[in-house]
Image (cartoon, rainbow, N blue to C red):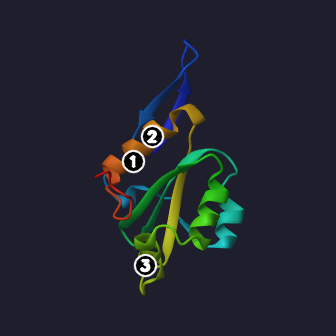
């Protein structure tokens, strides 16, 4: 996960400990309205959605709770919806609060490392 420390120059330095294996992440939450209301903060950050040990999607948000709730209702990413609706292991999410100015960098790092199956790829 990402941890942030404030440097003497006033900029945030990202110390990335990107997980090699999803088993390294101990705080996964069920992707449902109750868990989102209880655990997802109304702050900026990067998140991943998974089923079992397969990461389906990585995204960023200015408000993690609102964005994750939108995933439960939206019809935009058809591949993600099909992956979430199928039988089997329940969907879950993990997140890291990230300063706004680092959202793009941290999201790209997570996508590169986790290779989510439902993120759209540039042609």
Residue sitting at 37 percent across and 50 percent down?
Answer: 111
Residue sitting at 32 percent across and 47 percent down?
Answer: 112
| Nearest to N terminus: mark 1 or mark 3 | 3
Residue sitting at 52 percent across and 63 percent down?
Answer: 93
Mark drawn on residue 82: 3
Residue 91 shown left or right of residue 32 in the figure: left
Residue 28 shown left or right of residue 54 in the figure: right
- Which quadrant, please, contains the N terminus? top left
Q: CA distance from mark 1 to mark 2?
A: 6 Å
Label 1: which residue?
110
Residue 51 can be seen, yes or no: no
Label 2: which residue?
106
For the residue labelled by badge 2, is the local secondary structure a helix, a strand or a loop?
A: helix
x and y percentages locating residue 11 in the rendered image:
55, 20
Q: Residue furthest bottom?
A: 87
Of labels 2 and 3, the one closer to you:
3
Residue sitting at 35 percent across and 67 percent down?
Answer: 54
Residue 119 can be seen, yes or no: yes
Q: Are marks 2 and 3 in contact (CB under 8 Å)?
A: no
Q: Badge 1: few (under 14), some or many (20 or more) residues near its Cα, within 10 Å?
A: many
Mark drawn on residue 66: none
Q: Residue furthest front?
A: 123
| Nearest to N terminus: mark 2 or mark 3 | 3
For the residue labelled by badge 3, is the local secondary structure a helix, a strand or a loop?
A: helix
Q: CA distance from mark 2 to mark 3?
A: 26 Å
Q: Are marks 1 and 2 in contact (CB under 8 Å)?
A: yes
């Amino acid at each position: 996960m990402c941890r942030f420390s404030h440097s003497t120059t006033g900029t945030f330095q990202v110390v990335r400990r990107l997980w090699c294996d999803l088993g390294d992440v101990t705080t996964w939450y069920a992707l449902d309205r109750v868990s989102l209301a209880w655990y997802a903060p109304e702050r900026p950050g990067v998140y991943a959605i998974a089923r079992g040990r397969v990461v389906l999607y990585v995204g960023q948000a200015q408000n993690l709770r609102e964005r994750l709730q939108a995933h439960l209702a939206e019809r935009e990413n058809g591949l993600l919806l099909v992956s979430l609706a199928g039988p089997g292991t329940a969907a879950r999410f993990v997140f890291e609060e990230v300063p706004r100015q680092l959202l793009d960098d941290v999201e790209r790092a997570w996508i590169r490392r986790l290779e989510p199956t439902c993120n759209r790829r540039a042609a």
